[in-house]
Image (tube, rainbow, N blue to C red):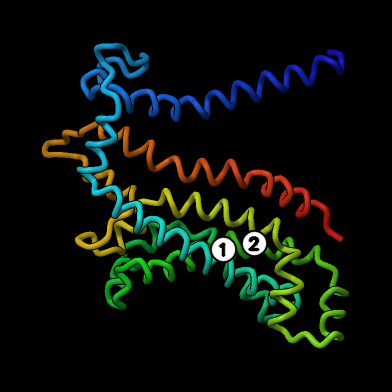
Amino acid sequence: MTDTKRPALWTVLFTLIAIAYLFPIVLVVINSFKGKVYISDTPFSLPTSESFVGIQNYIDGIAKTNFLAAFGWSLVITIGSAFWILLCTSMAAWWIVRANNVYAKVLYFAFLLNLVVPFQMVMFTLSWFTDYLGLGNPIGLWLVYLGFGAGLAVFIFTGFVKSIPLELEEAATIDGCGTVRTFFQVVLPVLKPAVMTVAILEIMWLWNDYLLPYLTLDLKKYKTIPVAVQYLKGGYGAVDIGAMMGVLVLAMIPVVIFYITSQRHIIQGVIAGAVKG
């Protein structure tokens, strides 16, 4: 095989993979404009003059799920949790790398253990513990997500901190910067590619997570979008599939916009993390 043909084959291969990933999303968007009877009977067909219902599914979904309230709580939980994860784990990773002692290594492996232990092993204990401490609210959920999101974030941040020349921090210290100023004015700006990479990964997880909010939140007061969607199920397994499709499309829009506008930072982060001094 000649070298000129290989790029074309890779292009075809990755195009097919992209289509496979995008197909379910396109299918949801198409079906969100069809009547629920036609969604069940002909899920792969385009809307026709008979099956097309306009934005009625969106209207029904917003009304039945109290979507605006669920959207607001999802936004509060996602932004708050992501902020504390990024802040706390970046500082922890910096200390682990620079301290480089027994305590730092033990702490680092404790964070890695977070990635190994399956969530199912702690979910029931977690539900009881959060209820006992009164954390069944969006603010309390920030702490829960901080614990579960710290493992991956610390793992990524430590790799990036190792690539930061120690001379930068020494120069800042000579100029009179304390520990806090050194981190926020010297280290954190250099960590921007890593911060964006972790932010994208964590926000996509936080926004779409169903199990943790369902186990910890007081559902009489607070519902995130994934939890609210489940309430479209009626008795005996009946589901308003049209309204569900409409709500799912609305739920995807913020994450898709965020990812499209931030994807270049992922590439920068991967490149920066791959080249370490």
- Viewer-nearest residue: 104 or 93: 93
Is 154 placed left or right of 31 in the picture?
A: right
Q: Quadrant of the C terminus?
A: bottom right
Give residue 112's position: percent from left, percent from top.
59, 64
Look at the picture and state if 187 lies above or below 68.
below
For disc 1, the marked residue is 151
How many numbered discs, if any?
2
Q: Amino acid at mark 1?
A: Gly
Identify the residue shown where x is 70% and y is 65%.
158
Q: Which residue is mark 2?
A: 155
For the point 28% across and 18% down, the residue is 52
Query: Residue 175: percent from the left, percent from the top?
Result: 85, 85
Q: At numbered mark 1, what does the secondary structure look like: helix, strand or loop? A: helix
Residue 221 circle label: none
Q: Nearer the viewer, residue 25 or 120?
A: 25
- Name which quarter of the figure residue 168 lies in: bottom right
CA gap between label 1 and label 2 equals 6 Å
